[in-house]
Image: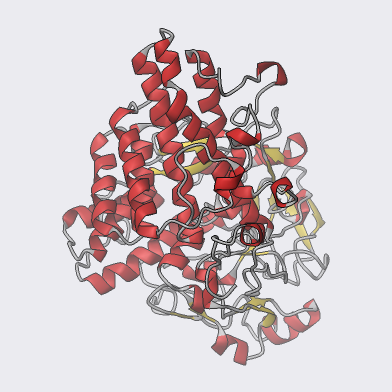
């Protein structure tokens, strides 16, 4: 009896645990699942619940420092320390939230026919059911990407049955996800007035992404190509504007989650904003990310004659200056300058010099590595007590283009369509059409090894802060390299930085770090000069290529087996 009082996360909220399990609505709207779904309104209300913000968090939101793009000063997460376990908040929340989605989607799929029997429009209800298939597919996709094999539940399950269920093999889960997306694709419309709802393109795009992550390249290429051939998506003209809260609609957005300050769904901009703007200047872009942007000749910084380590933003891919604030730039009305001798900077709003809190010579907690985020930040971030409401982009057209290109590269079926897809993304960064190959470094290589390397670098430049880097490193099996590296910062105190770096003419870096074929930077040669400081040492354990099953699930269910190494 005691164990039955423990609500296992997997089955939280399922039918026999609560009569109104699938409705987090106003209490006056609660209804029993035995009588709910009786009309179009009730089915729509249930479907709308599947779009809850908590169900669509991306890795960058919940796992801020789990890749090599971002660091919070000297702090390392459990993942970066190789101490991830089944009690970790993100592990528990992902499992719990996605099984809530599955439970609610199951009820809609299995019971919404009641509304048709009561006279509701069959086409309308079938469209809602298709949305439920979309969400159920997406939930199992998220779970299997992180945990591998997971329990497959398609119907309401009581506690006793739930306590005996084991994990379904990954091949079965994968096929189920593909089938679920196909059911959604067959019925969902190409577009809605409200871009937040799932569409045919969204189902195709997320199917393509999942297939790419699972290494099913033929499926990924086919689904991505189908999105392209819908002819309804195109790249936003300006890369930087796409991520601002003022850009509520864009032809590039395939599936987004809207934010609202009014309803408490927003981003707190104080963390990334520089200290001169009242922000914390943490977390920060890493030097690894900073070094990964190629030069305007398309070459990595250790190969390009255009790279100047003393003026590191010069002659770089334009997305660098749209993602990280350049030194000396008028950023939101104030000059940004982390130089240890820049004790004052210009406030362009007042026309006066002010104390520079963005150099550690003045403020100890200014950016430790001299870098601050720019992507997604504009003047609106200084309003509403630093609360901003940009869309959370789940998937956009640029991702589909690069999914298609990568899948074709891995299939070694490289043709002009592959180069066109990659060039379309890169050309947008330069503000030109892909046909203007004299105005940007176009992709021309056709051998698999070269193009694979270039594709991986392109993805990193295109998608920082969008929650995609983590899974890229996982599926490319690069996490062991990335998480074995050190984290670097400028020398401190600033008097030491001035003595050993500035006075010797070596600000910002003395020379370029080495860049490997995957775009990963190696700072060990610069470290050996004593001109940069090690702030942390990351660690890695191969077990973390999969997440641990939540500990509670293992403790109460003898048939739930843990992933290796945990």
Q: Residue at x 59, y 46 (%)?
A: 160
Q: Quadrant of residue 264?
A: top right
Q: In front: 417, or 427?
A: 417
- Placement of 132 over or under 123, stated as above or below: below
The reply to whether residue 428 is visible in this rendering is yes
Measuring from the top left, give residue 396's x and y in whole percent.
41, 43
Q: Quadrant of residue 288?
A: bottom right
- Placement of 147 over or under 533, stated as above or below: above
Measuring from the top left, give residue 305's x and y in whole percent.
40, 77
Q: In front: 372, or 505?
A: 372
Q: Is residue 300 left or right of residue 70?
A: left
Q: Quadrant of the C terminus?
A: bottom right
Measuring from the top left, give residue 378's x and y in whole percent.
62, 42
| Count of all numbered marks drawn on residues in the image | 0
Q: Residue at x 64, y 63 (%)?
A: 86
Q: Is residue 491 left or right of residue 449?
A: right
Which residue, as the protein is rendered here, is positioned at the far front? 1
Measuring from the top left, give residue 295's x and y in whole percent.
41, 67
Which residue, as the protein is rendered here, is positioned at the far top? 119
Judging from the image, the colouring scheme is: secondary structure
- Placement of 356 over or under 4, stated as above or below: below
Q: Residue at x 71, y 21 (%)?
A: 27
Q: In front: 8, or 434?
A: 8
- Placement of 74 over or under 354, stated as above or below: below
């Amino acid at each position: 009896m005691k164990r039955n009082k423990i609500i296992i996360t997997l089955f939280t909220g399922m039918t026999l645990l609560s009569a109104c399990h699938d409705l987090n609505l106003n209490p006056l709207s609660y209804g029993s699942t035995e009588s709910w779904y009786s009309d179009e309104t009730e089915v729509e209300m249930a479907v709308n619940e599947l779009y809850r913000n908590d169900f669509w968090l991306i890795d960058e939101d919940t796992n801020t420092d789990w890749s090599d793009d971002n660091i919070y000063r000297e702090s390392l997460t459990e993942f970066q320390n190789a101490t991830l376990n089944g009690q970790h908040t993100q592990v528990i929340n992902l499992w719990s939230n996605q099984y809530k989605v599955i439970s609610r989607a199951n009820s809609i799929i299995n019971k919404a026919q009641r509304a048709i029997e009561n006279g509701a429009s069959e086409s309308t209800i079938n469209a809602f059911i298709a949305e439920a298939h979309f969400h159920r597919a997406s939930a199992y996709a998220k779970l299997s990407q992180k945990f591998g094999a997971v329990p497959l539940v398609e119907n309401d399950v009581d506690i006793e049955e739930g306590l005996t269920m084991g994990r379904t093999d990954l091949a079965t889960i994968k096929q189920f996800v593909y089938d679920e997306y196909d059911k959604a694709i067959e019925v969902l419309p190409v577009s809605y007035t409200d871009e937040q709802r799932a569409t045919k393109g969204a189902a195709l795009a997320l199917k393509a992404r999942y297939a790419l992550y699972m290494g099913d390249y033929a499926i990924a290429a086919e689904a991505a190509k189908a999105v392209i051939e819908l002819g309804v998506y195109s790249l936003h003209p300006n890369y930087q504007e796409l991520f601002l809260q003022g850009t509520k609609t864009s032809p590039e957005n395939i599936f987004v989650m809207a934010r609202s300050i009014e309803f408490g769904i927003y981003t707190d901009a104080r963390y990334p904003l520089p200290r001169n703007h009242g922000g914390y200047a943490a977390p920060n872009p890493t030097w690894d990310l900073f070094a990964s942007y190629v030069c305007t000749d398309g070459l990595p910084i250790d190969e390009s004659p255009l790279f100047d380590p003393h003026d590191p933003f010069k002659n770089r891919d334009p997305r660098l200056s749209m993602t990280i604030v350049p030194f000396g730039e008028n950023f939101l009305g104030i000059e940004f300058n982390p130089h240890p001798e820049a004790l004052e900077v210009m406030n362009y709003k007042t026309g006066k010099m002010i104390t520079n809190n963005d150099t550690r010579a003045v403020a100890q907690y200014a950016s430790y590595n001299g870098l601050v985020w720019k992507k997604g930040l504009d003047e609106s971030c200084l309003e509403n007590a630093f609360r901003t409401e940009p869309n959370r982009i789940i998937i956009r057209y640029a991702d589909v283009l690069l999914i298609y290109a990568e899948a074709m590269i891995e299939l070694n079926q490289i043709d002009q369509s592959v180069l066109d897809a990659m060039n379309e993304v890169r050309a947008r960064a330069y503000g030109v059409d892909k046909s203007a190959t004299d105005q940007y470094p176009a992709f021309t290589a056709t051998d698999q090894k070269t193009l694979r390397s270039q594709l991986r670098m392109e993805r990193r430049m295109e998608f920082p802060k969008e929650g995609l880097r983590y899974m890229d490193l996982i599926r490319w099996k690069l996490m062991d390299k990335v998480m074995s590296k050190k984290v670097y910062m400028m020398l401190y105190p600033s008097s030491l930085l001035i003595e050993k770096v500035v006075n010797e003419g070596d600000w910002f870096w003395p020379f370029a770090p080495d860049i490997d074929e995957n775009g990963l930077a190696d700072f060990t040669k610069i470290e050996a000069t004593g001109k940069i400081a090690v702030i942390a040492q990351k660690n890695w354990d191969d077990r973390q290529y999969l997440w641990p099953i939540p500990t509670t699930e293992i403790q109460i269910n003898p048939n739930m087996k843990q992933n290796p190494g945990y």
